[in-house]
Structure formats: C-alpha cells, structure tokens
Amino acid sequence: MPVNQDVFRFHTIVPVRFGRAAEGPPQADVPEVDDRGHAGPEPEPAVGVTEGDTVKVGVLRAGIEDAPEVRLYAVSGSPDAVAIHAPPHGLLPPGPLGVFQLRALAGGEGIEARRAWVEVHAGGPTGPLLSRLAVHVFRPLALNLVLHPVRIKGATGEASSAADLKAVLALVRAVWRPCGIAVLSGGPRRDEAVFARAGTVADGPWSPTQGLKNTEIDRLLATGAVPEAVNAYFVRRLSSGAGVQGFTRRAAAAFQLRGPGIVVAETDASGKDRDPYDLANDLCHEIGHFLGLPHPDRRAAPREREDGWSRRMLMHNHNPLLGRDPWPRRSAAGEPYLERPLLEDAGYGPLKRGCLVTIRHVPRLAADGECLRARRTLVQPGGVY
C-alpha cells in the first residue's frame, strides 16, 4: 500500500481517522469520538461506551482516500472488554466512511473506565496496523432528572409548556450515555404558577443584597421540586430572552434562591419556538454544571475559547454558537474574540453547539477529561443534588 507524499523534514501521515458514524443530533448508539489532537500520554482518539451497549463508530479513509481497493478490518485489541459486533469478520464496507459496531462487554471498577482498544488493519485482520481507538467502557451510574412542564397564569391569560419532552429526554440520554451516565426520569410532573405575564418567568431583577430572593424564578424553583434529583422546569419564555437559567446548589445559595434547578425557555428572544435539540442541548449543558463541569478551559466571555474543538463541546459557553462574520467578531466591550474559527458547523447543524463530553485530557487545557470528572461528582455525597 504505497503512499505518495511530498515531505519537508517530517510529516505525520494519518491513513484513517475515527469519528461519529453519523452527523446531526445525538443518537444513543452513535457516540462522539474525542479525537482532539495527538499529544500527551494518551495520543489515541477515544470513545466512551456504557457496559452492555452496542454502538456505531465511523472510520474515515483520510490518507488513503485514493486507494479504495485497500480492505480495512476493525479488530478488537481487547476481546475480553469489547467485541466487534458488525460487519462480519470486521471487514469495513468500501467508500470514504466505513461504519462498524462494537459491543462493550465489561466496564471498569467504580467510576473508572476499563480502557480497551479497537484497531484498524489493512488487507486482513492481521495486516498492517493503521490506527487505534481507545474505548473507555464505563459501568452505568444513575442521574435522576425530573421534567416539569409548567402552565403559567398571568393578568391577561395563561400559557402552558408545549415542548416535546419525550424527544428532549431521548436526546439528553444520548448525550450522557457515552460517559456511562444513565439519565433516569419518570413521567413529567405538571406544575402551575401565577406570575405577572402568561407563560413568562421573570428571571430578574438581581439585587446586590437580596440576589434573586422572592423573584418569580425563585418561586418557580420551589414549585414541586423533587429531592435527590435535578429538577428542570419548561416554560414558554424567560423575561430576559435567555434560553436557559441554571442554578446548582452553590449558585442557588449565592443568589439566595430557595433551591437549585434549571429553567428552560421554549421560545427565543424573538418569540420563535426552539427545536428539541436546542432545548436538550441547553439542558445537558446545565446538567454538566451540576456535575461539576466548567466552560472549556475555564474561560468566560469575552475570553471564551472559540476554536473548533471547543465549539464541538457540550460545555462551550454559547448556544447557538457565535457566527464568524464579520471578521473578527467583537464583544460588546469591543474586545476581539480569541481563536475565531473558520467553521460554523461542529457536526450538529449550522451554529449549533456540539455535544462532546470529553474523555481525553489535552495538555495545557484546564478541567478536561470531563466524563471522569462528571462521574466523580455524581457519586460524591451532596455532589449533584
């Protein structure tokens, strides 16, 4: 399998790359692949799988796209932990993107992952090794989530939550499944509130001495709250025009709220309905904060990371993502945003924030390795709820 490549000093040749088996909204059996860079003690791309699950992973012919005659085989390098479920004998279908299914057989102890391998060989199962994928197999941990669709009566009428909560919940589960986090949720708990405007929750004003005490959002977070669970309230609109407001236990105490919780707005600032993906992405992002995850590299606006890797991450600061035009985009304070990317699609749709919860720890990035960090918080007494 000769490769013709002009080289000056050195050149890293990547014959194949691992990635998502399909783009678009997250799917329970199509996990994200953490392929950010190749530096550090664990240079291989990585994917997370819950013990017992069967998932799909894509193999892209990157450096051998002009050699379709080369047969590629997916082989388990850790047959006691992961198995190739399909295609037969691991022979990938021809074409630029080959998809295989792997089954996770055995996870690690406690919160830790069992680290296994899938290899891609050329010509046969024992042919030349082209690439390896680190498979982190997790035993499932439960996260309790309660969804509260809310009907809000106002001075001139009332308006009820209209979100497709079944679709939202399916997306939320798909996002957290690769970390071995099983989101448990019973049926929706319908609540009612009486505020100034129908369907609207006032998420202000904030007082330097009282925080958000006795505001409408404070009263809402005390409505029907279920202990030992993350409570998420779906309302038609937040008065600020924000898509979501989340308050962990620490944040709730800082804002003098009666309890923690998440409030998701079903319409944007213009009054347009938001689709289930955007609602689920915002909810998953706030759940990430409950699980102890900060924004990428612990940066806040206007100094947030805007590189392509960070925009794929669930914990990125913005949803929707900021556009790249005009160049360079500037904050309200007139400061240019850092690392402005050329891409506007992170694999989930134009200007939609991605859903990657990182597995690898990239050197020089603070607070990386998010799956393990989230699992550690989940098992700590008082860590989430």
Image (tube, rainbow, N blue to C red):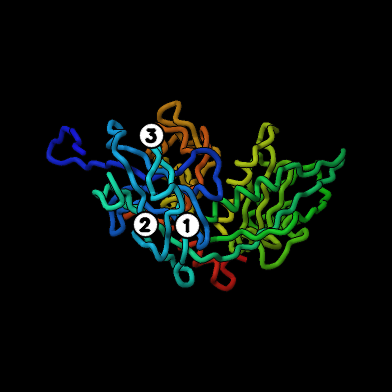
Tag 2's secondary structure? Answer: strand
Residue 66: image tag = none
Tag 3's secondary structure? Answer: loop
Three-letter amino acid code at disc 1? Arg
Give the residue furthest to the top. Answer: 326
Image location of residue 29, percent across then percent down: 53, 50
**Other-residue count near label 2 (Cα within 10 Å), few / some / many at <14 / 14–19 / ≥20:** many
What residue is drawn where x is 59% and y is 71%?
Answer: 382
From the image, tell me which residue sits under label 2. 76
Q: In this picture, is 264 found above or below 209?
A: above
What residue is drawn where x is 28% and y is 33%?
Answer: 67
Tag 1's secondary structure? Answer: strand
Q: In this picture, is 124 found above or below 249?
A: above
How far separated are the C-alphas under marks 3 and 2?
22 Å
How far separated are the C-alphas under marks 2 and 1?
10 Å
Residue 103: image tag = 1
In this rendering, would 8 be left or right of 30? left
